[in-house]
Amino acid sequence: MSTAKDTAAAEPLLRVRDLTVAFPTAQGPVEVVKSLDFDVARGGALGIVGESGSGKSMTSLAVMGLLPKGAERTGRIEFAGTELTALRERAMRAVRGDRIAMIFQDPLSSLNPYYTVGTQIAEAYRSHRRGVTRRQARAVAIAAMERVRIRDAARRVDHYPHQFSGGMRQRVMIAMMLSMEPELIIADEPTTALDVTVQAQILDLLAEIRADTGAGLVLITHDLAVVSEVTDHIVVMRDGALVEQGSAERIFTDPQEPYTRMLLDAVPRIDDEIGLLRTTEEDR
Amino acid sequence: MSRFLFNRLLGMVVVLFLVCLFTFVVFFVLSPDPAVQICGKNCTPEAIDQIRENLGLDQPFWTQFWTFITGLFAGRTYGTGANAIECAAPCLGYSFQTSQPVADMIVQRLPVSATIAIGAAVLWLLAGVAGGLVSAVREGKFADRFIAGLTLTGMSVPNYVLALALQFLLVVTLGWLPFPQAVPFGDDPVQWFANFLMPWIVLAIGAAAVYTRLTRANVIESLQENYVRTARAKGLSPGLVWRRHALRPALTPIVTIFGMDFANLLGGALITETVFGLNGIGKLAADSITKNDQPVIMGVTLLAAFLVVVGAMVVDLLYTAIDPRVRVGSAK
């Protein structure tokens, strides 16, 4: 792309086109993500919503190049002008963690129980920034922990994951990712394993970080209440395929697809009459 | 922590006491009269009675057992008057064959068995862990299958076959190694090393095969863990992901069995020591069994039991050092 920088500003941070993920089986390939298109604007926040099994997580792993063994990925994933699907593993590794960071659903099992949180935050930093000493990386880890408001970070840096509460562990995960100053953050169900009050804190934190750093955010969740707080654009997925996408405001006020409407109805509302819970089966 | 230690020590004492009792019963109730053996061919009933009295064999079972136990801690005296022999603690009695104190015989042989055990353990740990890691990382590929074939062979060949085959191949046919001779390390380190090399290999191969399989299974399991995915998502190199995030958790169960295996080996490698003519605890046990030298057999049995019990305790302590979740408990 030889065009000037002004067009780059209009270009999305992440552009996914015709993304398909398939697993080969004895009965032929099974597609878990079907020909998906979406964009994440620079500094934008995209919510990917769907039930479990709708292909949300596979989509995020496909972007990271971390699909499970045997999965086949086709289509295009363009990140800040670079075609990620064309990158060799080594080049992709330089992107992973450094420019695109990911946080996961269950912060306890996502942290290694054998190492202190400080070690785990610092190791990513040290492996991406050459010539960084242990001491410098430790300082970065403490700073990142302070930034996600873990109290007494200078002492807590030497603690093990099991010594933190659920919400604090997720803060550690966020600190780990934050220390790299990524351009894009992918959060896969970051609040699902946490209780409601803590959920709100973590979402606020993510929103605040996005505002501070200008990083793009992809928030994957089954919970529409979660995306409504943080994202500006929403992709609704079902059975691996795109149902509809649009601005968050439009999706919430004027959903075009019956499936989206149903997902919205499933969100408990304080002004709602109490009725039977609607299930997706009714619509089939 | 101190409570944990106290409980473990108490358990250890109970187990060792039971082992003492059991071995004592076996030798007291089931074996032929030692006095007749000691007396030899030209023997009179009076002489036999005299020996019985000296050894305390005329006493009831519990008295004999009690004397034996106190002898372990405080020493004991055999015979009376001018013929009295003082046996210092830990008194395991005297060999019927050589009349040497059993404790001395064991102490003399222990360095050989320790050398064999340490060398073999280093070999099998290195080979087993490395082989298991490679196997796990290359799961289903050629390297994995090749290593699987090797481990299967290693586990199926009995020690004595392997020992004789190696000796024939390396010493007789190829002449790469000198014929085994007992040489102290200080005199000729090269000869010393060559001497122990074969027993090390023989003992290591079977264990290395087991450790390879265990490491492989554990690493494959830990590669499925969410934190390995996190490590990859951080952009760590595969080497770092495998070493730090997959291998480290996989090693915990290996340390557990290693402690037991090593303690076991320290108590003597009976077959290997015999085949290579090394005067370790295993050879001592083999010799004393063929000659029905009861005090020596008992001494070796007690030593083996003691080492295994101590090994188990060391493993427990190591566990707390290895796994931070055990170390700090639920304390915040």
Image (cartoon, rainbow, N blue to C red):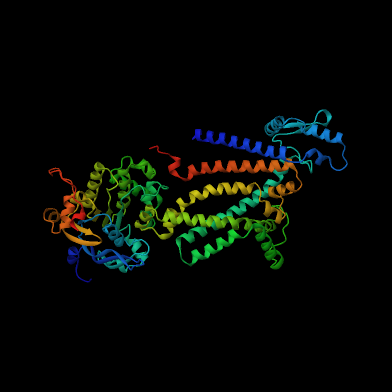
**Residue pictured at 71% horizontal, 45% vertical:** B108
Asked whether residue A72 appears in the rendered view, the answer is: yes
Drawn side of residue B256 relative to residue B325, left or right: right
Q: Is residue A63 left or right of residue B129?
A: left
Give above or below for A71 relative to B67: below
Q: Relative to residue B195, is residue B216 drawn left or right? A: left
Query: Could you say which quadrant of the image residue A69 lies in?
Result: bottom left
Point out residue A171 in the picture as x, y percentages from the top left corner: 30, 46
Q: Is residue A129 visible?
A: no
Residue A83 coordinates in the image, percent (x, y): 28, 67
* Percent of width and height locating residue A207: 22, 50
User: Is A62 drawn above or below residue B70 in the view shown?
Assistant: below
Decide which of B332, B165 is in the foreground and name it: B165
The quadrant where residue A195 appears: top left
Image label count: 0
Q: Give the left or right position of residue A147, taking residue B102 as reference.
A: left
